[in-house]
Image: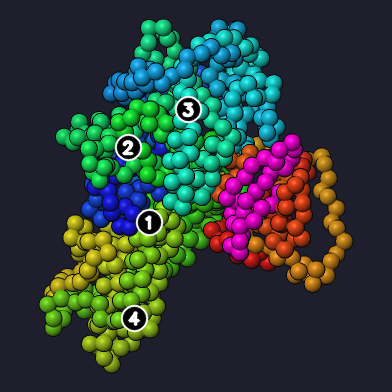
Amino acid sequence: MSELNKFKRFTITSALPYANGPLHIGHLAGAYLPADIFVRYLRLKKKDVVYICGSDEHGAAITIKAKKENTTPQAIIDKYHSQIKQSFEEFGISFDIYHRTSSAIHHDLSQEFFLNLYEKGEFVEKYSEQYFDEDFQQFLADRYITGTCPNCKYPNAYGDQCENCGTSLNPTDLINPISTLSGKPPVLKATKHWYLPLDKYQPWLEKWIDEKEGEWKVNVFGQCKSWLKSGLQPRSMTRDLDWGIDVPLEEAKGKKLYVWMDAPIGYISATKQWALDHGKDWTLYWKKQPNEQDNTCLIHFIGKDNIVFHCIIFPAILKAHGEYVLPQNVPANEFLNLEGDKLSTSRNHAVWLHEYLEEFPGKQDELRYVLTSILPETSDSEFTWKDYQARVNNELVAIMGNFVNRVMILMHKFFGGKIETANEKIVLKDEVIGYELFRIWSEIEQNIENYRFRQGMQAVMDIARVGNRYLTEKEPWKTIKTDPADARLALHNCLVIIGHLASAMQPFLPGSAKKVLNMLNWPEETIAFNGEVSFKNGHQLNAAALLFEKVEDSVIEQQIARLQAKKPAVQAPVSQIVPAKENINYEAFAAMDIRVGTILAAEKVAKTKKLLKLTIDTGLDTRTVVSGIAEHYEPEAIIGKKVSLLANLEPREIKGIVSQGMILMAEDPEGKLTFVSPQDAFDNGSVVR
């Protein structure tokens, strides 16, 4: 297993979802489905792996939800923890444990971490001015403050992040801040907190992250470098809250641990609970071992909004503690959009997992397939119900299901579903097909191990394509009349191809893989992943069954109508569309060389408000482009973004920087800019026509 072979065991985590609402497909595509595929693959390779997750049950988001629903934080976390856990189980995410941060074992471990760092003198104690609601007589956590984003001017940004443009904020950055408790402007008041001096760890973090270049995804590496380039500042590890884990100091009564200190420790406390439940030694999966070769491989699967916490803050905490291994990789995904708009829980613009499971019973693998095919691995992607229908009908049904169904029906029709051969067993007897399968298996494993699950899934589908092509060429329904032995040989070869297909499907489409294995009458435990596929003489196949069913237009129309009904009425903009320019001839258009590229690095141009200096991989070269988008995008938020680039624009010096091209942007009537980006995973250098 390439680089992964050097590790004896693996600790795989998925981001802890907030227990303040249900799951939607964006959550699945970000941190859970990719991790589940990877973990299932490791298990099939007989690796020692523990897959950890749980509900994040602290922080202001929980108390805000409780106030909205006029109930208690405990009632909120109990309600949504149960719902989230059940949704994961029904969908088939194969956690070894799904824990919760409200547990006693987690509270104890989080306080132990804090005291370890406190006793080592790692914290800086200082007073700072924080927003205070005079009506409610309490300090306001980040999410209790809203205001206008200083970056994109979105009026409902939170005190820690703008959900419109993705910029990380401090409450004091907001324009016209308002307390969500009283609806009034808060005042600044001094309070004491304990800070982790991230600036102290910056030299070590820079060296550690530089070692990940080429190993981590470009969007993850680039965002980390952007944060480091901006200079790290001390970050408070405590908060003035009434919900969370108590700070274990006499002088800190009434204060709680910062949720982003306690939440990632939830991975460790969940592992401790799992170890207690199964008689394991949890330290093997988290702590450094005397022999470095015995260390575990720690991998965090997250969405891009959590990169800074998992790649900078949590590693700094682990480093300060000193006993724990650090993450080998953090394969963060970008965002999944829905029907031309951002997924939004507040606007109810989402495909909720629990609703999908109710309305599409037994269709977990259909959703797994569609989401895997569009995973936002390197850039944002989009889910549409029409695409869902097309992929299920034209790929799962017409390619994969069709191949398996035809072979099984023909075997039962012509031979009673029984394997009969002069040899002890049947194996593949076609060198060309054997070579193709060998190549495809290599692609599947390489793609999974490099977190390219989209390509891995398509390689699995290629096995079915190979089988369909072979079956069509051999035409056993015709040769059964003239050469029954040749028809039997062809169908036996097809059964071997189906065996490979079933084996390869297991990480991606586990439920469907079980159906195929049942049709083949193979016990699941006897199938080696990418192992020999053969059938003994006299083996009896089980009856054929449909793997997948077509999705009808009425089903899709109903889902689209539901989303449309949820949308608030939008008043037409008063501003006018910019008039069209004069016509040009085709030769003028054809002279433009527009290419797909990826932003590798981004930084603000000094002494300017609008300009960003971008480093772009064009597939042809790596070049610098100066773009006037700084008022619309933070540098770290666009690293890894796919763009369309006018590549043959004459170079021009802007503010002392030679700009070699222009990225294409769309502008709405209000002047907001957005990237003109390819929706699919096109390679850098692809021509835009």
- Classify residue 625 as left or right of residue 389: right
Measuring 85% from the left and 64% from the top, which residue is drawn there? Answer: 583
Front disc: 4 or 3: 3
Label located before the other in sequence (3 or 1): 3
Q: Report the amino acid beneath label 2.
A: Val
User: Mark 1, residues whose alpha carbon is within 10 Å: few (<14), some, or many (≥20)?
Assistant: many
Q: Which of the pair 5/385 is nearer the observer?
A: 5
Measure the C-alpha gap from mark 1 to mark 4: 25 Å
Q: Report the amino acid beneath label 1.
A: Ile
Measuring 21% from the left and 76% from the top, which residue is drawn there? Answer: 427
Which residue matches tag 1?
Answer: 448
Q: Is residue 329 visible?
A: yes
Which residue matches tag 4?
Answer: 432
Label located before the other in sequence (4 or 3): 3
Measure the C-alpha gap from mark 2 to mark 4: 46 Å
The answer to whether the residues at label 3 and label 1 have Cβ atoms under 8 Å apart is no
Measuring 79% from the left and 72% from the top, which residue is drawn there? Answer: 587
Q: How is the image coloured?
A: rainbow
